[in-house]
């Protein structure tokens, strides 16, 4: 069973993924990870998805659906004034991560996030840090793919891959720490 604001949060993620016209495999995989972190049952997840499909006849109009259905307000109200204000930052990071999951942060996705930043009064510098982190992680992922394609299997390639993985993990730890310490 959903906890307060949880269904709207899941709907926000799903509508966000729909906003650029299609849901990629990597977005779906990331979405499933988020649902696991939220401890959602498969039934609850499917219920949220069904509701999104019901209200979002045109995926490109996802922002309009988010506003008209007051999903932005419901997710925000669920967290405003609570001790754990970093939850909104976690949601924002999840959105940025979903945006980059298919390696292209679309204009539609950016519009939704910019709306939420304004609506939730998120510090634009925090958002920019998230985007910069996601950009760097994407570049490191591409670098790792290049290393795999250019170096034969062996200790040299393994060492380069481990170094890149370590950099990505450090960046993830840093952004998670920023989110935990954040008070909006």
Image (tube, rainbow, N blue to C red):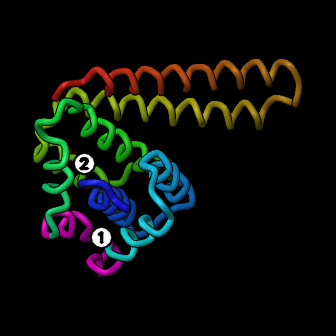
Rendered location of residue 98, percent (x, y): 42, 49
Quarter of the image where one finds residue 165:
top right
Q: Residue at x 28, y 20 (%)?
A: 181
The overriding secondary structure of the stretch rendered in magenta is helix
Residue furthest to the front: 1
Drawn side of residue 89 relative to residue 74, left or right: right
Which region is colored magenta?
52-68
Number of residue marks: 2
- Indicate the quadrant containing the N terminus: top left, top right, bottom left or bottom right: bottom left
Instruction: Decide which of tag 1 and tag 2 comes sooner along the chain.
Output: 1
Q: Nearer the viewer, residue 150 or 36?
A: 36
Drawn side of residue 26 relative to residue 48, left or right: right
Q: Are marks 1 and 2 in contact (CB under 8 Å)?
A: no
Rendered location of residue 32, percent (x, y): 51, 55
Rendered location of residue 99, percent (x, y): 40, 49
Q: Which residue is mark 2?
A: 113
Q: Residue at x 39, y 70 (%)?
A: 49
- Give the class, few, some or many, for how many residues have Cα within 10 Å of label 2's Cα (few <14, many ≥20): many
Drawn side of residue 106 relative to residue 83, left or right: right
Rendered location of residue 34, percent (x, y): 45, 49
Q: Secondary structure at mark 2?
A: helix
Q: Residue at x 40, y 27 (%)?
A: 176
Q: Nearer the viewer, residue 118 or 183?
A: 183
Residue 60: which disc? 1
Q: Does the stretch in magenta take in 81? A: no
Looking at the image, is 102 positioned above or below residue 142?
below
Residue 164: which disc? none
Q: Secondary structure at mark 1?
A: helix
Mark 1 or 2: the one toward you: 2
């Amino acid at each position: 069973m959903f906890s307060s604001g949880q269904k709207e949060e899941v709907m926000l993620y799903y509508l966000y993924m729909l906003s650029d016209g299609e849901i990629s495999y990597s977005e779906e995989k990331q979405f499933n990870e988020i649902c696991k972190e939220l401890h959602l049952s498969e039934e609850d997840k499917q219920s949220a998805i069904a509701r999104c499909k019901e209200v979002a006849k045109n995926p490109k109009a996802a922002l309009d659906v988010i506003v008209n259905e007051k999903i932005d307000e419901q997710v925000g109200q669920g967290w405003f004034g609570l001790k754990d204000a970093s939850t909104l930052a976690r949601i924002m990071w999840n959105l940025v991560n979903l945006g980059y999951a298919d390696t292209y942060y679309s204009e539609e996705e950016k519009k939704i996030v910019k709306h939420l930043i304004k609506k939730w009064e998120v510090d634009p510098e925090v958002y920019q840090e998230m985007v910069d982190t996601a950009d760097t992680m994407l570049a490191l992922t591409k670098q790792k793919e290049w290393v795999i394609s250019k170096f034969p299997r062996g200790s040299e390639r393994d060492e380069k891959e481990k170094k890149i993985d370590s950099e990505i993990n450090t960046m993830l730890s840093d952004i998670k720490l920023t989110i935990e310490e954040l008070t909006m």
